[in-house]
Amino acid sequence: MITQSTAREPVPLEADGPPFYLPVGNEVEVFEAAWRRGLPLMLKGPTGCGKTRLVEHMASRLGRPLFTVSCHEDMTASDLLGRFLLSGGDTTWVDGPLTQAARVGGICYLDEVVEARPDAVVAIHSLADHRRELNLERLGGTTIQAAPGFQLVVSYNPGYQSVLKDMKPSTRQRMVAVELGFPTADREREILERETDLRGRPADELIRLGQAVRRLDHPGLREVASTRTLVAAALLVTEGLSFTDAATAAVAGPLSDDPELRNGLIAMIRAFDPGNDPAAEGTSGHAGHQAAQKTTRTTNWIQERA
Ligand SMILES: Nc1ncnc2c1ncn2[C@@H]1O[C@H](COP(=O)(O)OP(=O)(O)O)[C@@H](O)[C@H]1O
Ligand SMILES: [Mg+2]
């Protein structure tokens, strides 16, 4: 099934329009320059670092309609290009999101393209290279020239096996790569403030927790605490959950099913919970130091039991 985005989860708007996106580097400039030149873009980065939000922001900023496809292993080329559908007694051709984007000069975003099978990804080759055209064999071989403004954007997590490796080097080389990582602590704090109503020490400690989890080097952790999971934890705290409960549900839970590892993460979360340490009120420097010490112990604990 194709998810075609027009409305996904509600996204906070900037004062005059585009969904909020805080850049971590020069990705906005690279994106825009590539778009002007009709160059396809590959966004590389860990899950939850803001790839999808960046595309939503840019589509709005550039004033182009966005067609988002969440890729998955059952996706076929027809899901991207279109197919004949029966309606009443008639068969009608219905454009897929890639074809629609090419016709109207929109941005077609293949989210998590690694999930797609190579035979589905073949559909994008002629659009990604200098031809910028689509051949719809099933529609009697119709060729569509991509309208001005069309751009192909794919995202993937380079930590995973990549279907893009199977792309022709000529196609891959036509793509402009943008490498995204997690924002610095200051920027991530700003994102938390924009995305949630959490303020003050709990927000600071969530950011520190995220950084500490990212420093963990544990084979059982395929992913680290992403900006997304920190935003989710912050939202849960603003709903009245304790820091520990919120971070356990939003950060530790999604990261691992392994009970030992989970317990280690929860111990780590407790060390950052401002509610567990009322004596430290107003002495956050000292508390931060204590938390860091506790975290080192927890980290050791996790590693010892790996
Ligand atoms: N640079 C950023 N600017 C604004 N919000 C961000 C940023 N990075 C992450 N977020 C937050 O994290 C959430 C997840 O980001 P998303 O774009 O869905 O990640 P990805 O597509 O890389 O998995 C967003 O909904 C947003 O709340
Ligand atoms: Mg995404």
Image: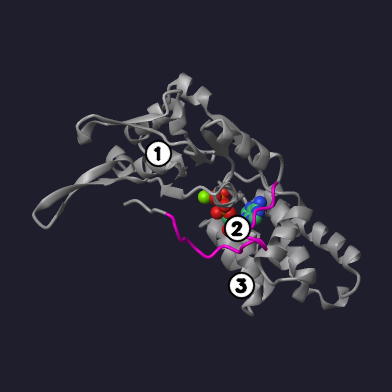
In the image, residue 49 sits, relative to residue 287, either above or below, namely: above
* Residue 261 in view here: no
* Secondary structure predominantly adopted by residues drawn in magenta: loop
* Cα distance in 3D space between marks 3 and 2: 22 Å
Give the farthest residue toward the top: 170
- The local secondary structure at tag 2 comes to loop
How crowded is the residue under tag 1: few (<14 C-alpha within 10 Å), some, or many (20+)?
Answer: many
Question: Where is mark 3, residue-wise?
Answer: 236
- The local secondary structure at tag 3 comes to helix
| 299 sits left or right of 76 in the view | right
Identify the amino acid type marked 1. Ala
Give whichever of discs 1 and 3 has the lower sequence position.
Answer: 1
| Marker disc for residue 102 | 1
The residue that appears at 69% across and 72% down in the rendered structure is: 197
Give whichever of discs 3 and 2 has the lower sequence position.
Answer: 2
Q: Which residues are magenta?
A: 5-23
Give whichever of discs 1 and 2 has the lower sequence position.
Answer: 2
Residue 19: x percent and y percent? Answer: 60, 58
Give the farthest residue toward the bottom: 240
Question: Where is mark 2, residue-wise?
Answer: 19
* Cα distance in 3D space between marks 1 and 2: 23 Å
Identify the amino acid type marked 3. Leu
How crowded is the residue under tag 2: few (<14 C-alpha within 10 Å), some, or many (20+)?
Answer: many
* Residue 251 in view here: yes
Foreground label between 1 and 3 = 1
* Cα distance in 3D space between marks 1 and 3: 40 Å
